[in-house]
Image (cartoon, rainbow, N blue to C red):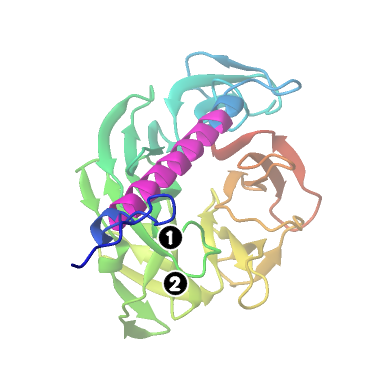
Amino acid sequence: MTTTAKRDPMTTPPKRNRMTPLRRRLIVLVTAVLLLAGLGTGMILRAADRADRANRPQAGGPAVSGGKVTLGQKDRLMFVNAAAGPHRTAVASVPSTEPGSGRTASDLKCARFYAAAGTGVCLQSDTGVLKQNNRALLLDSDLRTRHTYSLAGTPSRARVSPSGRFVAWTVFVSGESYASAFFSTRTSILDTRTMKLTPSLETFSIDLDGRSYKAADVNFWGVTFAGDDDTFYATLNTDNRTYLVRGSISRQTVTTLIENVECPSLSPDGTRVAFKKRVLSRTDLWREYVLDLRTLKETPLAERHSVDDQATWLDDETVAYALPAEGKVGASDLWSVPANGTGTPRLLIAGASSPAPL
């Protein structure tokens, strides 16, 4: 007779409940989702905290009050208010003769702004949870929206022709700045009389150094208009080179004039272009210059800081531009300098960008 030995429960380990591969994957997935959710919540809370701090007035900051701002006001300098407080990013204005005085802020908020002859353009960018909402607003003299246009990317540059008939804007389709290793831009021109929109200057014919030119890497940015409601200047980028081009809206053509010119701005008398010039090859530093369009002579301006902006002519003798505000992340100040290369830069408006003289 055979007997079977009984196992001692005190010494024999019980059978282990092995985890199935499916259960293991589910646990890993749930853990990853919880970690990502916590990370996302933390980022949102930090962004909200930064925005809350930026919307609180700071001691010693400029005096900003809400009020009526229109494009019909004479001898005013308009700009986007960058000072911390409830009017941050609002279109504001100050007297041209007293730019450091208290500023009046409108209800309109923009990332980029420009105006001329009673026509304004406001580029807006709202970052949501899932995507960024970018749009261009065509404005009347009272800053009311006439038309809204969806933008393909992040706002970069905006201009209005001297007559107010044409409006141009540039956005980053990819990349975040002109200093990025890889970026792509799209520049559009709107005829406010016919409401015809040219979605991209890349459809224009290019004459590069006297020959017809086509390439897949062509980018345009920084349009500035002449007073004839046809001629414009802009930057053309291709094959790692930048050119100043003169364009014709009616003929839909551009012709290269000179290399290493970015973000041109035509003087009120139409004879010169202020622009940023890349210092040394393959660097992300720019110096501000003025180009005589008749002789193509370049004059370096007195500003020694790197200027990554499209300058604005305050008059035929002075240009204004934005520089990062010292010690303030994401903020900028407006500076001005003589256009003939003499003098010294002076602070024009603290906490401001996108100047537009009326």
Residue 44, image x and y in percent? 47, 36
Compared with 101, 308 (above or below) is below
The quarter of the image holding the N terminus is bottom left
The residue under label 2 is 237
Image side of residue 346 versus residue 275, left or right: right
The span from disc 2 to disc 1 (Cα, nearest Å) is 8 Å
The residue under label 1 is 221
In this view, the residue in front, 109 or 327, is 327
The residue carrying pointer 1 sits among few (fewer than 14), some (14 to 19) or many (20 or more) residues within 10 Å by Cα, namely many
Residue 7, image x and y in percent? 34, 56
Amino acid at pointer 1: Trp
The prevailing secondary structure element of the residues shown in magenta is helix
Compared with 119, 8 (above or below) is below
In this view, the residue in front, 48 or 33, is 33
Residue 357 visible in rendering: no
* Mark 1 residue element: strand
What is the span of residues highlighted in magenta in the rendered image?
24-50
Residue 251, image x and y in percent? 25, 65
The quarter of the picture where residue 255 lies is: bottom left
In this view, the residue in front, 93 or 185, is 185
Amino acid at pointer 2: Asn
